[in-house]
Amino acid sequence: MKSISEKTKYNNVVISLFREDDLFKAVAVRKSGNNFQLLWHKKVSAEQMGWNQFCEQIISSIETDQPVPLILGYDSNNVVFYNIEIPPAKGAQVDAIVKMQAERLLPLPIDQMKLAWRLNRWDGNKNAVTIAAARIDELNKFLLTTRFCQPNQIVLDCSALLKSWNVFFASKYATSKNLLLHVKANKMQVCLFESEHLIRGTSLSYKPEELSSPETVAMFINDFRDTLDDFGCAAISDVGIYVISEDEMVAENLVAVLSQHQINAEKALPGEQLLDSFKGCSCKLLAEFIVPIGLSLAGFDAETESLNLFEDIYQSPLKKSRTGKSAGQFLKLSLVAVVLLVVLVLVCFASDKMKLVQMKKYFNDADPNSNLAQLVEEQRLRKKIAAQKLPIIDLLTKINKDRQDTVLLNNFLFKKGLRSSITCQTKDSTEMAKFAKSLAKQRGISEVRIQSQAFDEKKKQLSFTITFHYRNFTKKKK
């Protein structure tokens, strides 16, 4: 295999970059007819450099005058997936129906979230739809962090896993539903594929070495079964479960753990003929670089990424050449652009701050019992929610699912290893009990307790605090 700096003809080549836990990974893949070649691969510690330094290092070391497409991977840990069914519709009608249903699922206003959706199948009476959703500010933060890279495409890592699965594994395994458990250093990624489509994705926060404790194994199995339920795979026999890890022993141990709890799984191995058609790629390299390899494969297929969360918020520089010689010039221009952007942000911030001071004075003078004051309080809570990671948003989705308008959510506390707590207001104890009962029915929520309650005679409102466990996020690992 050639080194990254060795003179190479970069025709029909796609370069991909991805940050996986504490490592940056990059590959260059060439396509020739139906065959592929892994030209080189590279990984460095994220403690040594950031996204832009890594990207500049890769681009500046390429000895070519040809434009080379660059693909970045986006961590699906910042994305939530939903599966819905809608009646037969076409064009703009489908878009409107999907957005209407999404508004009921998301605890944040839809204008704070970016949605991407895809029709999976149609049986004549209804359409099955997969929705991917992410906070717009998180997407913009990623674009800012990677601003010097100027990728041609940004692809979800789940979609990259799907592409690698379809190329290397799909023809070997007969099941139509496949659940891939991708074991990383700090977490386990779970993706559900069906008929060459990505259906769902999530992460379980377990490190491989933690599964040596029986207590942690029990928690992991419980979370894994909950994930299967969420994915609509309660009947385990309907889905093939496959484990992949760059460490073969880790994959084998995890398969054994699942088997001990009556969950049939096997270590994912690529088809030999398929791997032979991918020159320079071994089983070990495929397991180690499965996401960036999938990203490059996606770069050759314009139709791969239909769940494009960056549509409308990022414009790809498709007409620009990316060569090693132009990297320095591009960096200088980017720095000028960043300085101008900072000046613009400071001006806008000063203007908005003056408006905010005026608004706060107006709202502070408002009657605390008025609808206006209640609206401000709800907006304050929404801002607090927006500052959290999406696993918490997923929890708030469950909290809001059956919450009546008579119950106002005032505050919440979510910290890993501690019971979650929410503070609410309602008119009486009957509404409080109803809310606590509906909360206890939500999948993943357990040990619901009314911790305290106090009735305000003046406002005729009951304030109460409920504590509960959410899956195993709130339980301490032993």
Image (tube, grey):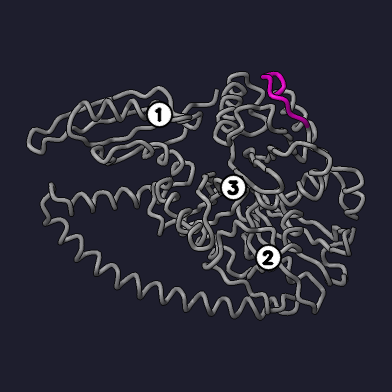
Instruction: Give x and y (percent) for residue 216.
Output: 59, 24
User: What is the x, y in percent for residue 332?
Assistant: 61, 79
Residue hosting label 2: 55
The answer to whether residue 73 is above or below residue 335 is above
Kind of residue sitting beneath label 3: Gly
In the rendered structure, which amino acid carries the disc numbered 2? Cys
Tell me: 371 left or right of 160: left
Query: What residue sits right under mark 1 in the picture?
Result: 419
Task: Give the residue drawn at x 64%, y 38%.
Answer: 188
Side (left or right) of 179 relative to 469: right
Q: Residues within 10 Å of mark 1 (few under 14, many from 20)?
A: many
Residue 381 percent location from the top left of the image = 31, 48
Frontmost residue, 370 versus 174: 174
376, 148: nearer the viewer? 376
Binning the other alpha carbons within 10 Å of mark 2 as few (below 14), some (14 to 19) or many (20 upward) gives many
Residue 138 bears which disc, if any? none
Residue 7 x, y percent position in the rendering = 88, 71
Dividing the image into 4 quarters, which one contains the N terminus? bottom right
Cα separation between marks 1 and 3: 45 Å
Q: Which residue is mark 3?
A: 124
Assess whether mark 1 and mark 2 are in contact (beta carbons under 8 angstroms). no
